Amino acid sequence: MTDLLKENKLLDAITTSFKIEGKVIRDHRVEVNADKNTVSSILLFVKNQLGYIHLAHMTCVDWIDQGEYEMIYTVYSPVDKITLFVKARIDREKPIMENIDTIWDQANTYEREMREMFGIEFPGLIGEHDFILEDWDQIPPMRKEFDTHKYAAETFFTRPGREDAKDVREEINKRSGAKVPDFAKKYSRE
Amino acid sequence: MENDKNSQKIVDYIQNFARKHSLFVLAYGTGCGAIEIPATMTSRYDAERFGIRGAATPRQADVLLITGYLSTKTLKRVIRVYEQMQEPKYVIGFGSCTINGGMYYDSYNTINGLDQYLPVDVYINGCMPRPEAVISGFVKLQELIMAGKANNGEKYRENLEHYRSNQKKIIKNWKMPDYNW
Amino acid sequence: MEDLGLKIFGAILTTFMAFAVGMTYGGIVRKLTARVQNRYGPPVYQNFLDLLKLQSKKTNIAHGFMGHMAPVWIIIAAVTVLMFIPILNGNLWFPNLSFHGDLIFLLYMMVFGSLGMALGAGQTGNPNSAIGVTRGLSQMVGYEIPFVLALVALMIQYETTSVQDLTQIQHETGVWNAFANPFAFLAALLASLGMFRYSPFDIVGAPAELASGPVSEFGGKYLGTMMSGGAVFAFIKLTLYVHLFFGGAGNPDDSGILATLIGIAVLLLKTFLLYMVPVFYGWINPRYRTEQAIRYFWGWPTALGVIGVLWAVYLN
């Protein structure tokens, strides 16, 4: 087992400066649980001081039972080759999060997507509201209380026959009278 | 167009023979199935020996290939493209997403069956269909043209109210030009 | 009077022959291109099927008066130029309206067709058409210069401006102009690469460039007429080249059926072999941008044309 020297050094640097918790998941993976007000200072700190210059991804997880959204920022350092997850929890009923557009430019696109799909407000975010969906008038669709199956069944027309889910190849062969060749029999369902 | 007079039959025969052996396909890939189109058109599974070639604009094209899923945003543009084509025009639905929704049947953003919004001539199933399946779909379209049964441009024109009501249920912000032919 | 009837019959025959030969050449080129790319291609008569299909479209979408006129002007230009080129030397079957100075007249009439297409494309209001038209006309500025220099070299060398006389002189001296003034021939050959719109100079009408440029809003019958006009123009330019540089075809003393057929066969052979030069060059080349094309044409081809003019002035 390799000793996780760099990961532990990184974790110590962050937790002692900001008084928060975190852990080393495995080698090259470190996660940190931050408070939502200090996320941008942590990101600026790791970007300028520790060399984590690449924002790889930014996403959101819906914890409906606990009534919270969890924002996850993924940053990467090409020198140390460690991926750092910065996690923060925000309230689910009135979600407002800081805009980190000024630190990395690509956060603009991720934040517009989250504004449309989850309903999170980012004060100071400049960009059109219609990003992927056009003329959307329901609740933000990635929330867990949005029943997408029911919405699809009501809005779009369903062709009958989907429920029994027969095997397509066998059906075509039955209807046209051909036979499934021997080498393809191992993919059959029967 | 079937007619009883013999001269009309000969004219129809010549016209259908020319139409089936020279299909101009609009170079428009709406979904993920568009990755099979270059494979069909190039050297290994040559589609040009059937007379199929790519056309650049809808005014020059005969066949509209709906390759894969259609989100509601794309459906508005595809309708506009379809109405710009000149008759006789054919629509081929690729993949299982056009038949019954395919892998995205429960998505809030993709339509479940193409038949309600545009008249379709031939469906090719598969996810994605291989080039041999694509060519067999085109051969089926050629048989339909020769039998005189591929008149879906007229069907769209006659049942315009029906198709429009279906389309307007999904596309709420309807700001499109009227269909004039 | 029967002379006039014969000439009218000959005119109609010429038009049909030019149309059929032009379209068949297009089909043969498509088949050869497919074989070069290691696949089977469409049948040789594929261009006729395309034309039939386009003419049998049931609805027509037009954009105004100029949109109707554009294909008509191309056909008018093609047929007019066809009447002035001697297809076979001094044959009574084919019309021969040549006069002194018709070489300069031909130069101007060949541009008339592009003008028609430009006006029609401008009426549609599509920005793609407008950009395609400007590209086409800029390229024409490029290749016209070596072409005109080559023709001027020939005119100076033989002191005549009639196509008929140039062919006659080649018959009398027994030496083709391609060898009598090789620099003019090379300049004209390199200019012909731009005329036939194969790679690398096909930026005007290629489907991947700006949605096919000027023809982007034409469909159905208009597109069919434009395609056939393009085919006729290809045959016209090839015949002009054969008459100017390769001695023409046909026997001026004999106008019987057999001699006519032999003359047509020789003409078809020569034009096909000459057509293979831009086609071969096109198989192996990618596409030039407009400024690269113009820079190419004003480089070596123009230099060769100037040397050809000097050759004609000083060595003869």
Image (tube, coloured by chain):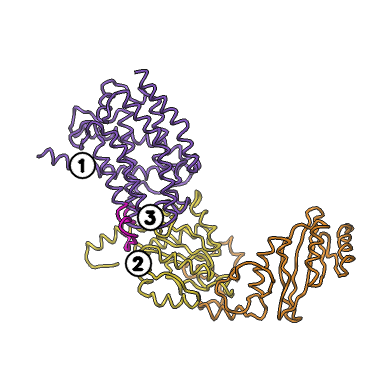
Q: How crowded is mark 1: few (under 14 residues within 10 Å), some or many (20 or more)?
A: some
Name the spot of residue A137 as percent of width and height, x first.
57, 78
> What residue is shown at x 88% (from left), y 65% (from top)?
A17
**Does C81 appear above or below C161?**
below
Q: Residues within 10 Å of mark 2 (few under 14, many from 20)?
A: some
Per the image, the residue denoted by label 1 is: C11
User: What kind of element bears circle 3?
Assistant: loop
Marks 1,2: beta carbons within 8 A? no
The range drawn in magenta is C50-70
- Distance (Cα) linking label 1 and label 2: 38 Å
Rendered image: mark on residue B22: 3
User: What kind of element bears circle 2?
Assistant: loop
- Shade representing chain B: yellow
Q: How crowded is mark 3: few (under 14 residues within 10 Å), some or many (20 or more)?
A: many
- Shade representing chain C: purple
Question: Are discs 1 and 3 both within one chain?
Answer: no
User: Which chain letter goes with mark 1?
Assistant: C
- Residue type indicated by callout 2: Trp
The orange one among the chains is A
Per the image, the residue denoted by label 2 is: B181
